[in-house]
Amino acid sequence: MNQYSIGEFAEKVGLTTYTLRYYEKQNLIVPKRDENERRYYDDQDVKWIGFILHLKGTGMLMSEIQDYVALRKVGDSTIEDRKELLQQVRKRSLAEIEEREAHLQILSHKIDWYDGKLEHQVDESFEEYLKRFE
Protein backbone atom coordinates (compact mmCIF):
# COMPACT_ATOMS: atom_id res chain seq x y z
CA MET A 1 0.00 0.00 0.00
CA ASN A 2 1.38 3.40 -1.00
CA GLN A 3 1.88 6.09 1.60
CA TYR A 4 1.55 9.77 0.72
CA SER A 5 2.59 12.86 2.60
CA ILE A 6 -0.06 15.56 2.78
CA GLY A 7 1.54 17.38 -0.16
CA GLU A 8 1.73 14.24 -2.29
CA PHE A 9 -1.80 13.31 -1.34
CA ALA A 10 -3.09 16.79 -2.17
CA GLU A 11 -1.50 16.59 -5.59
CA LYS A 12 -2.82 13.06 -6.17
CA VAL A 13 -6.44 13.96 -5.35
CA GLY A 14 -6.38 17.46 -6.86
CA LEU A 15 -6.98 19.36 -3.64
CA THR A 16 -4.90 21.79 -1.65
CA THR A 17 -3.30 20.90 1.66
CA TYR A 18 -5.50 23.61 3.17
CA THR A 19 -8.62 21.80 1.92
CA LEU A 20 -7.36 18.46 3.26
CA ARG A 21 -6.75 19.98 6.68
CA TYR A 22 -10.23 21.50 6.56
CA TYR A 23 -11.67 18.06 5.72
CA GLU A 24 -9.77 16.67 8.70
CA LYS A 25 -11.28 19.32 10.99
CA GLN A 26 -14.71 18.44 9.63
CA ASN A 27 -13.99 14.76 10.40
CA LEU A 28 -14.39 13.75 6.76
CA ILE A 29 -10.97 12.11 6.62
CA VAL A 30 -8.65 10.83 9.31
CA PRO A 31 -4.99 10.60 8.34
CA LYS A 32 -2.74 7.92 9.69
CA ARG A 33 0.40 8.89 11.61
CA ASP A 34 3.91 7.55 11.15
CA GLU A 35 6.43 6.91 13.93
CA ASN A 36 7.29 10.63 13.95
CA GLU A 37 3.60 11.59 14.22
CA ARG A 38 3.58 13.01 10.68
CA ARG A 39 0.30 12.49 8.87
CA TYR A 40 0.18 10.26 5.85
CA TYR A 41 -2.48 8.89 3.58
CA ASP A 42 -2.81 5.70 1.56
CA ASP A 43 -4.64 4.41 -1.51
CA GLN A 44 -7.83 3.79 0.50
CA ASP A 45 -7.82 7.48 1.40
CA VAL A 46 -7.50 8.34 -2.30
CA LYS A 47 -10.66 6.33 -2.99
CA TRP A 48 -12.46 7.85 -0.02
CA ILE A 49 -11.68 11.42 -1.03
CA GLY A 50 -12.81 10.53 -4.55
CA PHE A 51 -16.17 9.48 -3.13
CA ILE A 52 -16.40 12.64 -1.00
CA LEU A 53 -15.78 14.69 -4.15
CA HIS A 54 -18.55 12.78 -5.94
CA LEU A 55 -20.90 13.64 -3.09
CA LYS A 56 -19.89 17.29 -3.31
CA GLY A 57 -20.41 17.15 -7.07
CA THR A 58 -24.05 16.22 -6.55
CA GLY A 59 -24.56 19.42 -4.61
CA MET A 60 -24.57 17.61 -1.29
CA LEU A 61 -24.15 20.12 1.53
CA MET A 62 -21.15 19.91 3.83
CA SER A 63 -23.47 19.22 6.76
CA GLU A 64 -25.02 16.34 4.81
CA ILE A 65 -21.58 14.94 3.99
CA GLN A 66 -20.67 15.17 7.66
CA ASP A 67 -23.87 13.35 8.58
CA TYR A 68 -23.14 10.66 6.01
CA VAL A 69 -19.57 10.20 7.29
CA ALA A 70 -20.76 10.03 10.90
CA LEU A 71 -23.37 7.42 10.00
CA ARG A 72 -20.80 5.42 8.04
CA LYS A 73 -18.48 5.33 11.06
CA VAL A 74 -21.25 3.72 13.14
CA GLY A 75 -21.43 0.79 10.77
CA ASP A 76 -23.98 -1.30 8.91
CA SER A 77 -26.79 -0.50 11.35
CA THR A 78 -27.01 2.92 9.63
CA ILE A 79 -27.28 1.69 6.05
CA GLU A 80 -30.97 2.58 5.83
CA ASP A 81 -30.27 6.10 7.13
CA ARG A 82 -27.39 6.55 4.69
CA LYS A 83 -29.55 5.33 1.84
CA GLU A 84 -32.33 7.75 2.78
CA LEU A 85 -29.87 10.65 2.92
CA LEU A 86 -28.45 9.76 -0.50
CA GLN A 87 -31.96 9.45 -1.94
CA GLN A 88 -32.82 12.95 -0.69
CA VAL A 89 -29.66 14.35 -2.26
CA ARG A 90 -30.37 12.52 -5.52
CA LYS A 91 -33.90 13.93 -5.63
CA ARG A 92 -32.64 17.48 -5.08
CA SER A 93 -29.83 17.00 -7.61
CA LEU A 94 -32.25 15.72 -10.28
CA ALA A 95 -34.51 18.73 -9.69
CA GLU A 96 -31.51 21.03 -10.13
CA ILE A 97 -30.56 19.24 -13.35
CA GLU A 98 -34.11 19.62 -14.66
CA GLU A 99 -34.04 23.33 -13.86
CA ARG A 100 -30.65 23.76 -15.53
CA GLU A 101 -31.89 21.92 -18.64
CA ALA A 102 -34.85 24.32 -18.84
CA HIS A 103 -32.47 27.28 -18.65
CA LEU A 104 -30.26 25.76 -21.34
CA GLN A 105 -33.25 25.26 -23.60
CA ILE A 106 -34.12 28.97 -23.35
CA LEU A 107 -30.46 29.81 -24.01
CA SER A 108 -30.49 27.58 -27.11
CA HIS A 109 -33.68 29.25 -28.34
CA LYS A 110 -32.08 32.67 -27.85
CA ILE A 111 -29.03 31.59 -29.89
CA ASP A 112 -31.33 30.25 -32.64
CA TRP A 113 -33.29 33.50 -32.56
CA TYR A 114 -30.05 35.47 -32.97
CA ASP A 115 -29.07 33.25 -35.90
CA GLY A 116 -32.46 33.98 -37.48
CA LYS A 117 -32.00 37.70 -36.92
CA LEU A 118 -28.51 37.66 -38.44
CA GLU A 119 -29.80 35.74 -41.47
CA HIS A 120 -32.83 38.08 -41.76
CA GLN A 121 -35.19 35.13 -41.34
CA VAL A 122 -36.75 36.28 -38.05
CA ASP A 123 -38.50 39.58 -37.59
CA GLU A 124 -40.48 38.80 -34.44
CA SER A 125 -39.54 39.56 -30.85
CA PHE A 126 -37.90 36.86 -28.78
CA GLU A 127 -41.07 36.52 -26.70
CA GLU A 128 -43.10 35.90 -29.86
CA TYR A 129 -40.44 33.47 -31.09
CA LEU A 130 -40.66 31.49 -27.83
CA LYS A 131 -44.40 31.00 -28.30
CA ARG A 132 -43.56 28.64 -31.17
CA PHE A 133 -42.20 26.15 -28.61
CA GLU A 134 -45.03 26.17 -26.08
Image: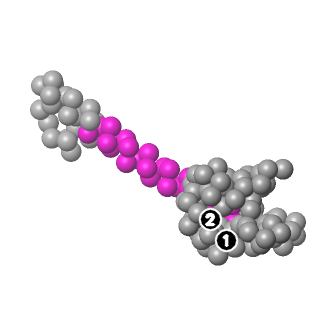
User: What residue appears at the point 12 percent right and 25 percent down from the top-left corner?
Assistant: 120
The secondary structure type at the circle numbered 2 is helix
Does residue 67 appear to the left or right of 71 in the view shown?
left
Q: How many marks?
A: 2
Classed neighbour count for the residue bearing mark 1: other residues with Cα under 10 Å, few (<14), some (14–19), many (≥20):
few
Position in image of residue 71 (x %, y %)? 77, 71
- The quarter holding residue 108 reads top left
Position in image of residue 106 (x %, y %)? 32, 43
Q: Quadrant of the C terminus?
A: top left
Where is mark 1, residue-wise? 24
Determine whether label 2 and label 1 are within 8 Å by CB: yes
Which numbered tag is attached to residue 41?
A: none
The secondary structure type at the circle numbered 1 is helix
User: What residue appears at the point 66 percent right and 55 percent down from the top-left corner?
Assistant: 9
Q: Looking at the picture, does residue 125 appear above or below residue 112?
A: below
User: What residue appears at the point 22 percent right and 34 percent down from the top-left corner?
Assistant: 113
Specify the amino acid type for callout 1.
Answer: Glu
Q: CA distance from mark 2 to mark 1?
A: 6 Å
Mark yes or no: residue 78 visible: no
Classed neighbour count for the residue bearing mark 2: other residues with Cα under 10 Å, few (<14), some (14–19), many (≥20):
many
Q: Nearer the viewer, residue 23 or 11?
A: 11
Question: Please, what is the dominant secondary structure of the magenta stretch?
Answer: helix
Does residue 113 appear to the left or right of 96 in the view shown?
left
Position in image of residue 43 (x %, y %)? 77, 51
> Is residue 97 in the magenta section?
yes
User: What residue appears at the point 83 percent right and 69 percent down from the top-left corner?
Assistant: 35
Position in image of residue 70 (x %, y %)? 75, 73
- The span picked out in magenta is 85-110
Where is mark 2, residue-wise? 20
Q: Looking at the picture, does residue 94 appear above or below residue 72?
A: above
Specify the amino acid type for callout 2.
Answer: Leu
